[in-house]
Image (spheres, rainbow, N blue to C red):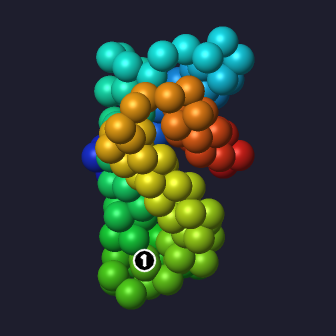
Amino acid sequence: PNSPKRKVIDGLCVVVLLFDLIVIPYMLAWDMPFVGFFQVMAWSSCILWTLDILLKLLTGVDVNGVLRMELRVAARAAVSVTFLFDITVTVSDWVSMLVITFAEDESSDSLRIVRLAKAGRLLK
C-alpha cells in the first residue's frame, strides 16, 4: 500500500477525479462536443479506474499494525470497502463509452448519456 508504484496510481486517480470534477459539469452545462481531448481523457479514465480496481485487489493491507500481503486478505479488504460502488461506476463508464463509440449517429442524447454516467464518478 505504501509502494511508489501504488502512490503513482493513487496520484493519477486524484488527477483524473479532479479533471472529472471540473470538466463533466462544464460539458453538461454547455453541451460540449465529445471529441478529441475529451474523448481521449474519457477512455483514459475508464482504463485507469479499471486498473485501480484490479490493483486494490492485489494491494496489501495493514491489519492491527502488521502488513498482510496475502492475496486472500488483500482481496477481502478491497471487496469490503468500496468495491461494489467502484465496480458499478466503472462498468457504467465502460458501457457508456461503448454506447457512444458504436452509436450510428453522435446525437446529443448519446453524448448526454455518457456525460451523466461519468457524473456518477463524482459521488466518490
**Residue depicted at 37% across the width and 48% down the height:** 98
Q: Residue furthest front?
A: 104
Q: Is residue 80 above or below residue 13?
A: below
Query: Quadrant of the rendered structure where residue 74 is?
Result: bottom left
Query: Quadrant of the rendered structure where residue 24 is?
Result: top right
Q: Is residue 15 visible?
A: no
Q: Nearer the viewer, residue 11 or 91?
A: 91
Q: In this view, does 46 lie above or below 73?
A: above
Q: What residue type is labelled 1?
A: Ala
- How packed mark 1 is, by other alpha carbons closer than 10 Å (few <14, some 14-19, many 20 or more), is some
**Residue depicted at 32% across the width and 44% down the height:** 102
Q: Is residue 108 visible?
A: yes
**Percent of width and height locating residue 111:** 52, 31
Q: Which of 107 and 112 is in front in this view?
A: 107
**Percent of width and height locating residue 70:** 34, 83
Q: Residue furthest left?
A: 5
Q: Is residue 67 left or right of residue 19?
A: left
Q: Is residue 78 above or below residue 94?
A: below
**Residue depicted at 33% across the width and 82% down the height:** 71
**Residue depicted at 33% across the width and 54% down the height:** 51
Give the labeled residue for mark 1.
Answer: 74
Image mark count: 1
Q: Is residue 67 left or right of residue 85?
A: left
User: SS at mark 1?
Assistant: helix
Q: Which of 124 and 36 is in front in this view?
A: 36
Q: Which of 97 and 25 is in front in this view?
A: 97
Quadrant in the picture for the N terminus: bottom left
